[in-house]
Amino acid sequence: MRLVRSLAVLLGLTAVVSFPNSVHAEVKLPAVFGSHMVLQRDAKLPVWGWAEAGEKVTVSFRDQSVSTTAGNDGKWSLALEPVGLGDPGTMTVKGSNTITLEDVLVGEVWVCSGQSNMQWSVNAAIDPDLESAASTNNQLRLFYVPRVSTAEIQDDVDAEWTLCTPETVPNFSAVAYYFGRNVQQVLGVPVGLIHTSWGGTRAEAWASPESLAATAELSPILETWEKSCAAYNPEAAKAKYEAELEKWKAASEKAKAEGKPEPRRPSLESDPRLSQHHPSNLYNAMIAPLKPYAIRGAIWYQGESNAGRAYQYRKLMPVMIESWRDVWGQGDFPFYQVQLANFMQIRDEPGDSAWAELREAQAMAGSVLPKVGAACITDIGAAKDIHPKNKQDVGKRLARLALHNDYGRTDITPQGPTFKSIKVEGSDVIVEFETYGRGLISYYNEPLTGFAVAGEDKAWKWATAEVVGRNTVKVKSADVSAPVAVRYNWADNPQGNLYSDLYLPAYPFRSDEWDGVTINNVAP
């Protein structure tokens, strides 16, 4: 059954996976518990599942053995005390039957989620043959959640833990794999990666329904979807499809007879209630079933589908993060985003940018919530490809944040320079950066680019800039005699070249708070 449902997902079929939990003749576990799994070290280890009502269930691992009793609804849960690193072990779960999970490691566990750039596989990124050939690593374990969208909270997912091998790596998330590989190699401990993503989806689809309903600023999202769902008529949709199909058949026959290309076949309008874009549907099917499996933290690559709604995203992203933290019950676990890469046409003049505003919103989550950060990748994108192929550097930059912030590796610089303050001195603007112990440089000592300044008239002009100290840059423009604000890399496809001396890019910023792009579209 698991194989059949996995094939359905791979073929692009929408599936609703039902896991009954009220009647059980024997003890069962959710799929996230399995042979080859990684348990989070030095943390309470929740274990849960289903059994006959009133049945005694005992979970044993290493020198621990903990028992509980299934409730009237057939559910049971317990927690093992924290465990440390050690040799591969065996976990047994015993009731009327016994489940034996082999080759269980203890180490670091990370959830890896988002849209298509997180879903993007090793096989679709650069150097797939070389990377896959070198991927055998018994200390790295993979768990790939199938793409399922549901309107109801699910109990389980149709997946399993696998070893990291040239056979399993090619179709796994490239960003997740390169992140996990770096963390595993630096720490020298086992790492488990839980990959749960879906291309083209919006952040609201990944937030819990309770968190969205409780946030007034996000009500336009819910209201828009409620109207769309209320307007959907399955009978009318079917009748329309059948009528269009008959027209298509006639047009197709005519095209064939005339030797012309066949027209596009019509498709049946899908039910918006089951859409992967519907608020909370992916949380229901692809996040909720995983909790409260003990984890260290989460990495997140998403935002393209929310571009144009940056001001709303400022609220949405913290709400989503907190909704995950609340249900996991493990406090403020680390959460690291990937900022949008540079993309689309390179503009000749400075100005407003929806993608720049979204990057800003991504960074702002770290000022609202603890242990939240963002990796900058505005130097590795592509003008005509929303899926940049260099995922190795994305994984490295996420790993830097985690290794420095969460694992005490102060010898590793966490990120590139970030904006700190400005000081206006006549026609010059002195910009100070937080450089995290490094110095500022331009890319291969080329003249600095990407800076713009504006006066009180808010008219942005390109500026010249130069590094004048270990952490400062002087910016000026012959067209702005009295500057009041400065921006750097504020564009959809920025081309600025300010780096730290480790060649980590400076983060885009603006010192002003002037309103820019305010699309804020929420239509399905």
Image: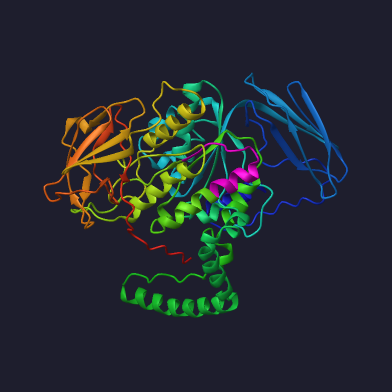
Q: Is residue 270 visible?
A: no
Where in the figure is residue 449, as x and y percent of width and height? Answer: 19, 41
Residue at the limit of the structure toward the right, as seen here: 54
Residue 495: name its quadrant.
Answer: top left
Residues rendered magenta in the picture? 320-336
From the top left corner, tell me how far across and down residue 260 is, in percent.
31, 72
The residue lying toward the viewer, choosing from 15 and 185, is: 185
Residue 103 seen by the camera? yes
Q: Position of residue 190 (x, y in %)?
A: 56, 25
Closer-to-camera residue (240/1): 240
Is residue 330 part of the magenta span, yes or no? yes
Tell me, yes or no, whether the highlighted magenta stretch contains residue 300: no
Q: Nearer the viewer, residue 281 or 218?
A: 218
Q: Is residue 362 above or below residue 189?
A: below
Left or right side of 304 for 33: right
Colour scheme shown: rainbow
72 displayed left or right of 395: right
Residue displayed at 39% across by 51% down: 358
